[in-house]
Image: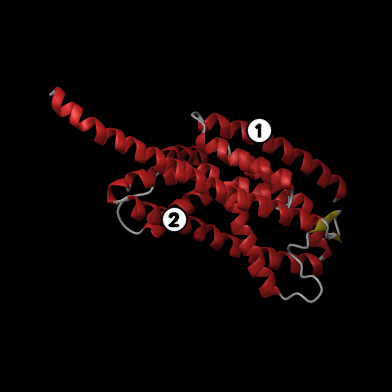
Amino acid sequence: MDIVGASLMPLVSRHVYTARVSQRVFVGVVALVFAICAGATVVWCLSMSTIPELPMTGGWSLSMTWAPMCGQKWPRIAVSFVGMWIVMMAAMMLPSLAPVLWRYHEALGSTGRPRAYRLTVLAGMGYFAVWAVLGAIVFALGFVFTMLAMQWPLLSRAVPLAGSLVVLLAGGLQFSGWKVRYLTCSQGVSLCREGSACMHGARLGIHCIVCCAGLTAVLLVNGMMDLRTMTLVTLAITAERLAPAPERVAHAIGVVIVVIGLSMFARAIVLF
């Protein structure tokens, strides 16, 4: 047995070394993608902050993200929005997505490292493809809302009040059993080893979109170009997805969101 054990030691050591190298490569690639996406998001937000917003009836301002500037066409704006939406979501979701992708990569280890890396990349692409679809839907809704708000002063006046109610609803969702079920599933969720990597990534993306619906709504209401809001939402999503006690974290985040919503509601009532 000692001779057999001694003969197996080099193989075990080689396997451990290969796994460590693979993990370092994975972490390095994810960190690089995150840094690029985060940097691009910061540059985009800073560039948008230099563009004056359009004052609207009701005491709020319309970001030029939703309105065409001189000479711009809507299709070009839509493509630009969806592109930056994907980059922004990559920066926001990668911290909580990376552990899931790593477990998937490890499950594929027996198929060969090159194939495991390729399928992991495809799963990530499927995940963010779903977020891209959501980005297109968000832009379409934002486009319709912008047109209506610019034409109907009464609707424009009600925007701050409606926004505060959305934030309050998002805060309330943090205490719901529905939210707890999705967070509990999130801690055990993983990508299947068999089948299409893109499809499994897409299913995971849908799961994350539903789980993060409230926090995404908070981001949209408070301005997706606001770096502070974006950073806080990213930290909230990561904390509630990776924390050992996700229910408690979700409730704590819900308290903060409700307080913010009440503050927004009080200001909206004064301005209405």
Please state which of residues 69 and 248 is positioned toward the viewer in this rendering. 69
Task: Give the x, y percent position of residue 56.
Answer: 85, 60
Q: Is residue 147 left or right of residue 214?
A: right
Residue at image location 12% in from the left, 24% down from the top: 1
Q: Is residue 145 left or right of residue 92?
A: right
Label 1 neighbour load within 10 Å: few <14, some 14-19, many 20+: some
Residue of label 2: 121
Please state which of residues 174 and 189 is positioned toward the viewer in this rendering. 189
Mark in front: 2 vs 1: 2
Q: Are marks 2 and 1 in contact (CB under 8 Å)?
A: no
Task: Give the x, y percent position of residue 120.
Answer: 41, 52
Residue of label 1: 255
Tell me the amino acid under the disc marked 2: Val
Residue at image location 39% in from the left, 56% down from the top: 118
User: Residue 243, can we see it?
Assistant: yes
Tell me the amino acid under the disc marked 1: Val
